[in-house]
Amino acid sequence: MKIAELNHVAIHVEDVERSVQFYSRVLKLESLPRPAFDFPGAWMRLGARQELHIIGERTHPVHSHNRRTHFALMVDEIDAWETHLFAEKAQFLPKKARPDGAWQIFVQDPDGYFVELCTVAGQR
């Protein structure tokens, strides 16, 4: 028995449309078809096979931080991503090198969730 891969990350949001706009515009994620659940939400592509599931009607506070609950996405050209985030006026922490040589930027979504954009060690 083994786990094959991560299938999806789910986040609970206050405003589905606002979150879809953020993830499509700022993080350039593609929308996916979603089954007709009895609650609001949206699905978006994360990389080749993983998905982000946005679930609406959040009423509880979000507890996310770059050193606590967050999810990370491998990206290319971290400098280009930083320039893009500036242009989008996104809330993010400046890029920094990790001790292993990888680069990372933490961007915050409209609900307060942190998403890490990171590179392979030695790639910039």
Image (cartoon, rainbow, N blue to C red):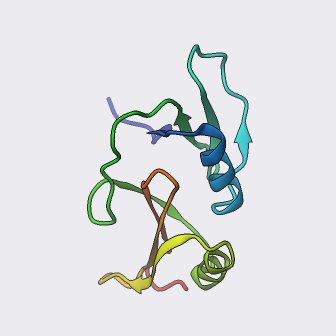
Image-quadrant location for residue 81: bottom right
Query: Does the image show residue 120?
Result: no
Q: Can you name the residue that lies furthest to the left here?
A: 68
Look at 47% across and 86% down and name the residue there.
Answer: 122
Image quarter in which the N terminus is found:
top left
Image location (x, y in percent) of residue 3: 37, 36
Image-quadrant location for residue 86: bottom right
Asked if residue 4 is positioned above or below residue 118 in the image, the reply reads above
Toward the viewer: 40 or 82?
40
Toward the viewer: 75 or 41?
41
Asked if residue 36 is positioned above or below residue 19 in the image, the reply reads above
Image quarter in which the C terminus is found:
bottom right
Image location (x, y in percent) of residue 90: 58, 70
Look at 50% across and 39% down and name the residue there.
Answer: 14
Image location (x, y in percent) of residue 101: 38, 85
* 105 left or right, relative to 22: left
Look at 64% across and 42% down and name the residue there.
Answer: 44
Look at 53% across and 83% down and name the residue there.
Answer: 123
Image location (x, y in percent) of residue 31: 72, 42
Toward the viewer: 105 or 57?
57
Query: Does the image show residue 103?
Result: yes
Count of marks placed on residues? 0
